[in-house]
Amino acid sequence: MSTVKTKARGSHLFLPLSVLAILIVINLIKGADYFSMTIINGALYGNVPNILFGASELVILAIGMTLVTASSRGQDISVGVAAAITSAVFVQVLQGAGDITWWTIAASFLASCAAGMLIGAFNGSLVAVFKVQPMVATLILFTAGRSIAFMIDGKLSPVLANDLTSQLGGVIPGVPIQTPIILTVVFIALFAALLKTTNLRLYAESVGINEKAARLNGIDPTRIKFLTYMILGVCSAVAGFIAVTKAGRHDSVNLLKFVEMDAILAVAIGGNALSGGKFSVTGSIIGAYTIEVLSRTLLRLEIGTETIKAFKAVFIIILMVVASPVVREYASKALRRVRAGADDCAVAEADTAASGPDAPAKMEV
Amino acid sequence: MKKLLKISMLCALVLLMLTPAAFAVGDKETATSSLIKVGIVNLPPEESGYRQANVEDMNKVFSAANGYDAKQTNTGDNSEQIAAAQGYIRDGVDYLLISAANASGWDNVLKSAKSAGVTVFLFDRLIQTDASNFQAALVSDMATEGNTAVNWLLAQKLPEYKVILIRGQLGSAAEQGRSAAVLKARDSGKLTIVADGTGGDSWSLEEARKVVEAAITSGKDFNVIYAENDGMAQGAVQALDAAGITHGKGGKVKVIGFDFNRFALRNVQAGYWDCNIQCSPRQAAEISRWIKAKAAGTALPTGIVFQKEIFVDTASITDDIIANLGLNADPGKGVITK
């Protein structure tokens, strides 16, 4: 059983990893120095740190989005807006605290996490208690949220110009890696620990696969869904924190604008079914980095500004079609036929090998 | 019992909603006699820092103290804007001021304003319609803004100009006007464009940063950042800082931004950036001047009128400019927004 499980998970990761590999090969063809790194101002600099730095918010949001997708069989389209609100809270609390020290920053960050949980509770209660479709429920904040952030900001975009927060959004002296990258790694580690030490994965998956069966087994679907939205709220707060320290000022209009679409896309590229159930956080993380690499690859290839979006869309369409169950099934059948033709003795073996790609498709249902 | 409670709550809610309306009507009837009636159709302040300053400026200038009875509608929905404009025409305003969400679909409203004898001014944004349908339009001249920036750049007498162009939302008036100047200078051989990118529809800081990072990591040599708004200039400078490339006064790369955000002006003042070009949201004073001059017997201007806008560099910037002409929050003197 355990081997089947790892095989299924492994083939989930096959698609995002192979896409990432293709993109890296394209980049290497364009210039062999793609992976080269230098130390500038005491921090590593190069394409790889740039990618890790640029994708940090998206990775964190994709993690939360994966969990929400798994349990509620829908997506939260208000994550970017939620991040704008929580970071507005962060900035206001920090500026209200007077002195900016590591302690006041930590306290303001906790306040923004509380705001994130509040937003999560709002969305979560609409979805879990009132059974509103997730996309419709979160549409409310998606529409109105930036106005709320604008009001919290006091109708101006406050500036966060001080050494400590710019170190958080950039480099802490003596640390050779940009701080947002470290924060992202810490967040991923904490989240992995959460999944390892609790039954959250099992509960979220079972609620997503069959709510009634989960209830019969003593799992309260309402509570689990609510919880996943709360966790996503915290993810939004962390992402907003990173985004606002990077930017150095709070721009309620443009902060993490349209990031929700990329977060959902990351979940999909990661091999997760958007209809809930079994999920792979690793896949989503790779998906998020893939999106970042893709947009940077298009810039590196110097594709015209007018056509860059179209290129991105075409690439994603190809990706999604290749990943679709129909094409996968066809491919595995073709593979089987080829192998059967080549060697009759290997038929049995090919069958078991082909069951790999098939298995996740069944699980997604 | 529960039903009764619900009904009574509903009634209370309806009453609550009606009261301000009733009060508003009462106010209007007592105070209209000698005031000039103005209806303003504008975009919502949360659209941008620019719009926030614009809305505030309208409220400040068209106040009862200045002799106006003005009402402002703020919405980003074109059909709601049109409905609001029709409402103002029915109310019998003297002047109708419009900053349209969408450049088309306004012909009928403008015609009915004309037949009702309402004078229409457009501000900030133009409408695709016959010039006879409105009195005058007061807008920023994006092409001149671009030319101002390029002229400043060419006056720096750099040995060569290798420019990274970071455009705003493709096709927007600001992007077209501001890009045109650079493209023209390139075509006449005065500068070369090393990288041509965009911050996308949200004029995104992050996207701008990526454009510059891509140029740096592919080993391109450049000495000018031409970013079509302040946020994108900020993102571009973050990329320079991370790569250890000097910029600003005495630095290798000249940084040009647009819009006059106060944080950007402070950066120019500190020599962190080099140049910033104004895009003024304050049209109200000029329009008010027109209206007052009309009352004194001068004819109203016609057609498209461009606002006078300035630019600053590290030498010409002053605290007065930052205080009076800047947008958004002021980080304070000497504070650099990285």
Image (spheres, rainbow, N blue to C red):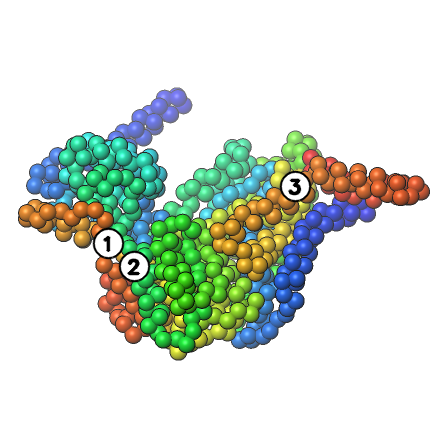
- Tell if the residue under mark 1 belongs to the same chain as the one under mark 2: yes
Q: Could you tell me how far apart the alpha carbons at marks 1 and 3 are, in whole angstroms?
A: 51 Å
In primary-sequence order, the first of circles 1 and 2 is 2
| Residue labelled with disc 3 | A321
Q: Is residue A249 something that shows in the picture?
A: no
Looking at the image, which is closer to me, A327 or A147? A327
Residue B225, image x, y percentages? 43, 66
Classify mark 3: residues with Cα within 10 Å, few (<14), some (14-19) or many (20+).
Answer: few
Q: Is residue A33 something that shows in the picture?
A: yes
Q: Is residue B69 left or right of residue B80?
A: left
Verify CB contact (< 8 Å) between mark 1 and mark 2: yes
Q: Secondary structure at mark 2?
A: helix
| Residue labelled with disc 1 | B306
- Tell if the residue under mark 3 belongs to the same chain as the one under mark 2: no
Q: Residue at x 18, y 53 (%)?
A: B285
Query: Which of the chains bears the disc numbered 2?
Result: B
Q: Residue at x 6, y 47 (%)?
A: B297
Q: Where is residue A182, by image quadrant?
A: bottom right
- Tell if the residue under mark 1 belongs to the same chain as the one under mark 3: no
Q: Amino acid at mark 2?
A: Thr
| Residue labelled with disc 2 | B144
Q: Secondary structure at mark 1?
A: strand
Query: Which of the chains bears the disc numbered 1?
Result: B
Q: Residue at x 38, y 70 (%)?
A: B273
Q: Taking B169 as reference, is A344 above or below it? A: above
Q: Residue at x 12, y 34 (%)?
A: B29
Q: Amino acid at mark 3?
A: Val
Number of the front mark, 1 or 3: 1
User: How many labels sit on residues?
Assistant: 3
Classify mark 2: residues with Cα within 10 Å, few (<14), some (14-19) or many (20+).
Answer: some
Looking at the image, which is closer to me, A337 or B82? A337
Q: Amino acid at mark 1?
A: Phe
